[in-house]
Image (spheres, helix red, strand yellow):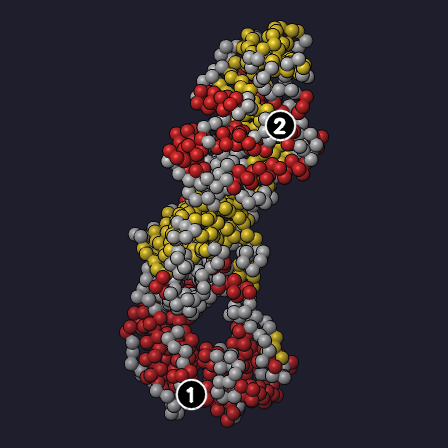
């Protein structure tokens, strides 16, 4: 028994650090001690204990941990150094006791509960080393007084890890006295029973330590395993319960280990790798594999749910260190190590955090960075009316968890909390995919309240990632390559914003790589105003929804700083800075494909060009609204005004263009901004009618639903804008005879504008359907803006291969305005079309020649400038296409 007890006690004694000899000689030569963070403290004047250090530093100083270095270095010191060390050590201990005594006083850290237990362990390490017998009665008196204090019930911290560490230090002390055949001045069985009671009460039925932090789960398991071995060596009653608990606890430790062999940074868990020695805590070949990736057995289950404790984990692989890993945490069991992180999701892939957690910064609760780490602002969670949850309010029953049918390799769970006053919040997480490229995480948030609130969801990104804000989410880049996208959707209007670094005490995006070390990062802020609402966040690490259209970090696309950020591209023509601006709006495409239109068609035109993306929702918002909230509209208006002002361009010199949905947006914003010209192709005028049949997802985004009322609301968007528009805005519309827009939209538009006293010019192109309008409109738009004011009306000229006719469509023929068109080949006049308000003229032509049309415009009695169209080259087959 003595040999076993001696070995067990030896294992429990604290050990010195790697540079123990260096630290010992530094102490002897310079009277300083060096902390694990390489801080230097002068021990000569005894001021280091009473200076205003952070709590973690004071814990280290009052815990005497640095003294343990000297026990490890003893054998390497010479005799002179040993004598000096003993003398100095006696002086230090006497100085400490002269300041703080043998019982608790006014200093909050000298006899802090856990620090006192740590100090007893440091003193025991000294006692059992060759230094101990030389230290004398004062040292022994301090060690015994410390043990007796810890044994007092009134000093005990209770059933928490600090109380366990107090009891653990006492158990080691009792074993040491038993080994030395000295009487034990307290009941060891009472201490052992209290440790077992702690184990029963501080672990959930699923074997998870209740103090909200994987690293403390491991620490407590390590201590309990050590105390079990110590109790066995002391011949105390064995505990079968403790053995089974450690088997259960190994399962959570396993699934809380990331592919990079670190614990997920929840609660007070730093990001350091799990030490290899930790595998001895559990009799688990699977945990051994998770830590080493070399020894042990790869686990089978890739998903695990700890429903009672409030955790769920998923990974794509147990053998790939770059695997994707996710944990949802919704645990609240008390105050210890509790962060305000209900509903928190952590996600990493490729060894880097994707949805990141700030992690812990330290224990100095007055430090703003520590406060941020503990607060809701440091986690991927919810804020209500700009405020997070209290760290601890005692309402543990208001946070709970539910497994929705997860399997060994699929995760579907839901977290709930009603800790916000009058608000119930839930977060459902579903993970699909067996590889990173196919991994799709769907996060569905719901909030419910009788009152309207400002809800804010925060999504923190790892410091290595560069997010690019899109209308409904972000694209994530690392080293110039896209590695993920986060898309957010809701029937309630959302406002998205990126937070960067330490903007102000509340607007922070920070990453604590380890205790006391901070990096700036970026976070997505999703804000909505509602009583009850649902928000879906889709995270993809491959198989992307957004089509690559060149919107990348540090590219030519910029993001506006308005209430709703917009992606835009500005091409400034140096010669036209004070002349004209053309604003281009995009048409409707497939979901996720948000592109700009007509850039190549407008190249070479003497106008500055502003391309704006409509990357809101699945297919766009008509640059107008989300859930009837018109913040998008106002942000577009503000951007146009800001760009025009910066270029010195009057609104009368602004032209808005676009086809189909882009044409509708060009009308909306052209009328609203009272621009000089609007040139569109086959726009939707009755937007509700069109979207309800052709793009219901767009109607839902615009109006917040797809009811008849929503449809009628969308139908009135343009008519409402036109009422307030300028009579001086000239509007030209191009549409085909085979396009259903002609009867369904353009004819009603003519009546609408005529009734308001703002007639439009319509050019109808025979044989063109809506699917072909883009090709025809491209030339129409180009010619409309070509050479700026030198062209008096917009026009389109094309070759109709079916009829072998050259077709010209002249716009803006309204009121008393008429046009005459002369067909030329080179200098040869081939045909004349007299003055008429007919917008379309046609001539039979033959291949192998070049053609152009000279256009004469008369507005009442006034003759406007004459112009030539661009040359249509029919000398090659390609020009027929």
Residue 842 horizontal/vertical position (percent):
55, 10
Q: Quadrant of residue 53?
A: bottom right
The residue located at (58%, 19%) in the rendering is 812
Residue at (66% x, 13% y) in the render: 861
Circle 1 is placed at which residue position? 148
Quadrant into which the N terminus falls = bottom left
Q: Nearer the viewer, residue 759 or 500?
A: 759
Is residue 69 positioned above or below 412 on the image?
below
Residue at image location 48% in from the left, 64% down from the top: 374
Mark 1 Cα shell of 10 Å, populated few (<14), some (14-19), many (≥20): some
Q: Position of residue 238 (x, y in %)?
A: 29, 78
Neighbour tally class for label 2: few under 14, some 14-19, many 20 plus, Cα within 10 Å: many
Q: Residue 57 appears at what percent x and percent y? A: 55, 74
Residue occupied by mark 2? 676
Q: Residue furthest right?
A: 575
Q: Is residue 175 above or below residue 516?
A: below
The residue closer to the viewer here, 289 or 812, is 812
In the rendered view, tell whether residue 455 sits above or below residue 209: above
């Amino acid at each position: 028994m003595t040999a076993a007890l001696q070995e067990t006690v030896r294992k429990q004694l604290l050990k010195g650090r790697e540079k123990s000899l260096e630290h010992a000689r530094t102490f002897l030569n310079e009277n300083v001690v060096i902390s694990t963070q390489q801080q230097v403290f002068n021990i000569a004047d005894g001021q280091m204990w009473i200076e205003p250090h952070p709590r973690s530093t004071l814990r280290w100083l009052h815990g005497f941990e640095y003294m343990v270095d000297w026990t490890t270095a003893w054998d390497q010191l010479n005799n002179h150094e040993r004598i000096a060390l003993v003398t100095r050590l006696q002086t230090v201990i006497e100085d400490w006791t002269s300041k703080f005594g043998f019982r608790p006083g006014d200093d909050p850290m000298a006899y802090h509960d856990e620090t006192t237990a740590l100090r007893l362990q440091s003193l025991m390490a000294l006692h059992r080393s060759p230094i101990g017998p030389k230290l004398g009665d004062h040292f022994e008196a301090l060690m015994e007084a410390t043990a007796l204090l810890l044994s007092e019930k009134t000093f005990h911290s209770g059933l928490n890890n600090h109380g366990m560490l107090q009891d653990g230090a006492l158990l080691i002390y009792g074993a040491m006295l038993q080994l030395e055949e000295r009487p034990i001045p307290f009941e060891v069985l009472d201490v052992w029973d209290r440790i077992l009671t702690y184990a029963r009460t501080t672990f959930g039925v699923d074997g998870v330590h209740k103090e909200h932090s994987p690293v403390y789960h491991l620490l407590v398991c390590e201590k309990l395993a050590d105390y079990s071995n110590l109790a066995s060596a002391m011949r105390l009653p064995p505990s079968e319960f403790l053995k089974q608990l450690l088997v259960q606890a190994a399962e959570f430790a396993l699934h809380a280990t990331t592919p990079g062999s670190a614990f997920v940074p929840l609660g007070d868990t730093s990001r350091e790798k799990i030490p290899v020695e930790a595998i001895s805590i559990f009799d688990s070949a699977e945990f051994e594999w998770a830590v080493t990736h070399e020894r042990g057995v790869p686990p089978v289950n890739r998903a695990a749910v700890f429903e009672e404790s409030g955790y769920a984990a998923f990974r794509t692989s147990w053998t790939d260190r770059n695997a994707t890993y996710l944990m949802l945490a919704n645990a609240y069991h008390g105050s210890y190590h509790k962060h305000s992180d209900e509903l928190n999701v952590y996600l990493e892939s490729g060894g880097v955090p994707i949805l990141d957690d700030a992690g812990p910064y330290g224990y100095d609760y007055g430090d703003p960075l520590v406060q941020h780490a503990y607060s809701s602002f440091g986690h991927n969670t919810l804020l209500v009316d700009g405020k997070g949850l209290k760290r601890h309010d005692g309402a543990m029953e208001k946070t709970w968890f539910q497994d929705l049918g997860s399997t060994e390799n699929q995760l579907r769970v839901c977290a709930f909390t009603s800790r916000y006053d009058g608000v119930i919040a839930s977060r459902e997480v579903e993970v699909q995919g067996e590889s990173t490229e196919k991994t799709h995480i769907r996060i569905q948030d719901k909030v419910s309240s009788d009152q309207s609130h400002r809800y804010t969801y925060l999504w923190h990104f790892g410091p290595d990632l560069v997010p690019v804000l899109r209308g409904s989410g972000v694209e994530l880049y690392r080293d110039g390559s896209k590695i993920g996208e986060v898309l957010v959707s809701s029937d309630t209007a959302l406002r998205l914003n990126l937070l960067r670094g330490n903007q102000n005490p509340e607007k922070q995006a920070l990453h604590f790589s380890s205790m006391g070390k901070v990096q700036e990062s970026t976070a997505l802020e999703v804000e909505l105003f509602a009583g009850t609402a649902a928000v879906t966040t889709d995270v993809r690490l491959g198989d992307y929804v957004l089509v690559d259209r060149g919107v990348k970090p540090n590219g030519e696309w910029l993001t506006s700083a308005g209430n709703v950020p917009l992606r835009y591209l500005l091409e400034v023509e140096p010669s036209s800075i004070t002349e004209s601006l053309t604003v281009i709006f995009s048409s409707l495409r497939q979901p996720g494909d948000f592109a700009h239109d007509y850039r190549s068609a407008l190249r070479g035109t003497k106008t500055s060009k502003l391309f704006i993306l409509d990357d809101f929702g699945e297919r766009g918002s008509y640059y107008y609204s989300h859930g009837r909230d018109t913040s998008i509209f106002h942000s577009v208006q503000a951007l146009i005004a800001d760009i025009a002002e910066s270029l010195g361009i009057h609104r009368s010199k602004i032209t808005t263009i676009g086809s189909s949905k882009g044409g509708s947006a060009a009308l909306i914003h052209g009328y609203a901004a009272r621009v000089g010209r609007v040139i569109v192709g086959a726009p939707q005028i009755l937007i509700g009618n069109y979207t309800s049949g052709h793009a219901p997802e767009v109607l839902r985004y615009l109006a917040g639903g797809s009811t008849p009322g929503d449809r009628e609301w969308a139908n009135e968007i343009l008519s409402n804008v036109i009422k307030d528009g300028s009579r001086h805005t000239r509007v030209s519309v191009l549409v085909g005879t085979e396009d259903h827009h002609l009867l369904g939209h353009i004819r009603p538009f003519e009546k609408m504008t005529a009734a308001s006293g703002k007639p439009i010019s319509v050019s109808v192109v025979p044989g063109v359907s809506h699917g072909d309008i883009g090709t025809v409109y491209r030339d129409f738009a180009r010619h409309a803006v070509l050479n700026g004011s030198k062209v008096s009306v917009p026009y389109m000229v094309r070759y109709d291969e079916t009829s072998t006719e050259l077709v010209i469509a002249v716009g803006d023929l309204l009121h008393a305005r008429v046009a005459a068109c002369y067909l030329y080949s080179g200098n040869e006049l081939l045909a004349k079309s007299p003055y008429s308000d007919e917008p379309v003229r046609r001539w039979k032509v033959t291949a192998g020649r070049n053609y152009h049309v000279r256009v004469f415009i008369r507005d009442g009695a006034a003759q406007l400038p004459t112009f030539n169209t661009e040359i249509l080259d029919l000398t090659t087959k390609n020009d027929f296409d």
